[in-house]
Image (tube, grey):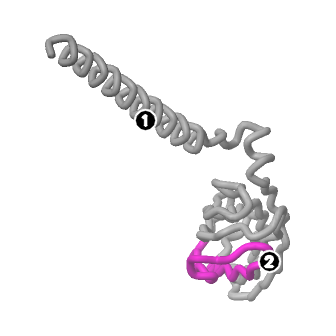
Amino acid sequence: MKIIASPVLDFTASLDNPIVGEKSQLTLKIVNKGLGEARFVNVKSSSSGYTILSEPQIYIGNINSDDFENAEFQIIVNEKDPILSALIEYEDLERKKFTKTINIPLSTYTNEEAIKLGIRQKSNTQSIIVAIILILVIWLIYRYISKRRRMKKSMQGVSKWT
């Protein structure tokens, strides 16, 4: 008697930098919850709301029962809350082929939302540059005024002796 168990795959996705318009690493976690092994696992991602910078197809290999593997893609998020669309192809131990299409919504934020949520710190670069320029202008004005005062004093000293 031969008992065959099939793989049961579950999927989750995450972004390391979920901000619209920025480069991020998209991680698709594939978990085998079944009793059988998933063999020759291949992931093909198609972009929907993001631009894929890395290869859109990744070969994972085998995923044992009660184990997981990750497929990672370098992307740029183009719009708010894009959807990860991917085609997963794999075989079971009897070489029966399976294909599964997944659509997983990804949570992303605009720059303003990320600052409000504390995901990103507000940049102070512009304020620092303005402060440095202001200090430089004040310093130049101070030097100009003190130089004129010294010149006036030295001119008054010369006129007394003549």
**In this orientation, does residue 125 appear?**
yes
**In this orientation, does residue 69 appear?**
no
Quadrant of the snapshot with the N terminus:
bottom right
- SS for dot 2: loop
> Are the residues at dot 2 and dot 1 in contact (C-beta closer than 8 Å)?
no
Residue at image coords 66%, 69% = 76
**Residue 160: x percent and y percent?**
20, 11
**Residue numbers of the magenta segment:** 39-62
**Residue 139: x percent and y percent?**
40, 29
- The residue that label 1 is drawn on is 136
Disc 1 residue crowd, few under 14, some 14–19, many 20+, Cα 10 Å: few
Quadrant of the snapshot with the C terminus:
top left
**Please, what is the three-letter code of the amino acid marked with disc 2?**
Ser
Choose between 11 and 132: the one closer to the eye.
132
- The residue that label 2 is drawn on is 48
Choose between 72 and 94: the one closer to the eye.
72
Residue at image coords 62%, 69% = 71
- Residue most extreme to the left: 161
**Please, what is the three-letter code of the amino acid marked with disc 1?**
Leu
